[in-house]
Image (cartoon, rainbow, N blue to C red):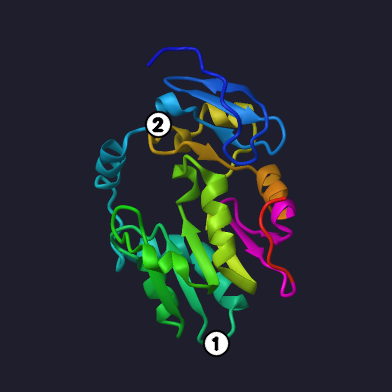
C-alpha cells in the first residue's frame, strides 16, 4: 500500500502524532508519549495476523527460547514472594514462560486471543502479569494496558518484554519493524510516560525488558 498516512491520534495517550518514518508502511510518532505506531490502514486483519503467528517456531522445551525468556523471568522471580499467582497474557501456543514460572512454585493462568481465548482469566486479580513480545502487536495499547493494570493487585508486577525504539537512524535499519504484525513500538521515554500515567514504579532492565510495580496503597488507571 502506497499512500499518505492519514491523521491518526496516538493509540496510547490520544495526543497528536507526526510521521516518523516510511517504507512499505507509514510510522507515526506521538508528540507526547513518543510511541511509534503504524496507522490502521496498514494493520492486518485477524486472519492474516493469525497466519503470521503460525509461522513462528517457539518450542517450550527449547533451551534457547527459555534463555530468551529468562531475561524477563529471572528479574521477576527475584521479586516475587513464594506461591504467587500470575497471568501470562499473550502466551501463544506454547506457554514456555508460564512453565518456567510454575517450575519455581508459582501458578500461572493463560490468555491469548488466538491460542488460549479464555476471557474468564481477564476477570481475576493477579500478583503478577507477564506480556512477552505482545504489546508491539496491540492496535489499542491504552485499552489493553489499562485492563491489565486493573488486574494487577496492589504491590504486584506487570512485566513487559518488547524491543525498544532508540532513534530514527536505528529505526530505519531495524529488523523488528519489518514484522507486519508489529504496529506499536515503545521507547524508554514511552515507558516513563506510562509509569507516570499509572503511578507505577518503573524498572528498566535489558534493552527489551521493563517491570512496572503497582503501589501497595494505590489502584489507579491512566490519568
* Residue at the (39%, 38%) spot, across then down: 181
Q: Nearer the viewer, residue 103 or 110?
A: 110
Magenta-highlighted residues: 196-217
* Numbered badge on residue 43: 2
| Residue 142 location (% of width, % of height) | 57, 46
* Numbered badge on residue 52: none
The answer to whether any part of residue 162 appears in the image is no
* Residue at the (70%, 30%) spot, across then down: 31
Q: Nearer the viewer, residue 65 or 215?
A: 215
- Viewer-side label of 2, 1: 2
* Residue at the (40%, 57%) spot, across then down: 90
Q: Secondary structure at mark 1?
A: loop
* Residue at the (27%, 52%) spot, across then down: 57
The reply, left or right, for residue 16 in relation to residue 52 is right
User: If the image is split into quadrants, where does the N terminus sit?
Assistant: top left
Q: Nearer the viewer, residue 79 or 29?
A: 29
Q: Secondary structure at mark 2?
A: loop
| Residue 108 location (% of width, % of height) | 42, 75
- C-alpha distance separating marks 2 and 1: 41 Å
Magenta stretch: includes residue 146? no
Which residue carries the number 1 mark?
82
Magenta stretch: includes residue 202? yes
| Residue 150 location (% of width, % of height) | 58, 63
Amino acid at each position: 500500500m502506497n499512500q499518505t498516512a492519514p491523521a491518526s491520534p496516538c493509540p496510547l495517550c490520544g495526543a497528536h502524532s507526526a510521521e516518523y518514518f516510511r517504507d512499505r508502511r507509514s510510522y507515526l510518532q506521538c508528540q507526547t508519549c513518543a510511541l511509534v505506531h503504524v496507522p490502521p490502514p496498514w494493520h492486518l486483519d485477524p486472519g492474516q495476523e493469525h497466519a503470521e503467528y503460525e509461522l513462528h517456531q517457539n518450542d517450550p522445551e527449547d533451551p534457547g527460547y527459555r534463555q530468551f525468556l529468562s531475561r524477563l523471568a529471572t528479574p521477576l522471580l527475584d521479586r516475587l514472594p513464594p506461591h504467587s499467582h500470575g497471568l501470562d497474557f499473550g502466551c501463544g501456543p506454547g506457554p514456555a514462560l508460564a512453565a518456567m514460572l510454575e517450575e519455581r512454585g508459582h501458578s500461572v493462568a493463560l490468555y491469548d486471543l488466538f491460542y488460549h481465548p479464555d476471557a474468564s482469566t481477564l476477570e481475576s486479580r493477579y500478583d503478577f502479569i507477564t506480556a512477552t513480545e505482545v504489546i508491539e502487536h496491540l492496535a489499542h495499547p491504552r485499552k489493553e494496558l489499562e485492563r491489565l493494570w486493573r488486574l494487577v493487585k496492589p504491590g504486584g508486577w506487570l512485566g513487559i518484554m518488547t524491543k525498544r525504539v532508540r532513534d530514527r537512524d536505528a529505526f530505519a535499519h531495524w529488523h523488528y519493524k519489518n514484522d507486519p504484525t508489529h504496529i506499536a513500538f515503545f521507547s524508554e521515554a514511552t515507558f516513563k510516560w506510562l509509569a507516570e500515567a499509572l503511578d507505577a514504579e518503573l524498572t528498566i532492565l535489558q534493552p527489551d525488558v521493563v517491570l512496572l510495580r503497582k503501589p501497595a496503597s494505590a489502584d489507579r488507571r491512566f490519568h
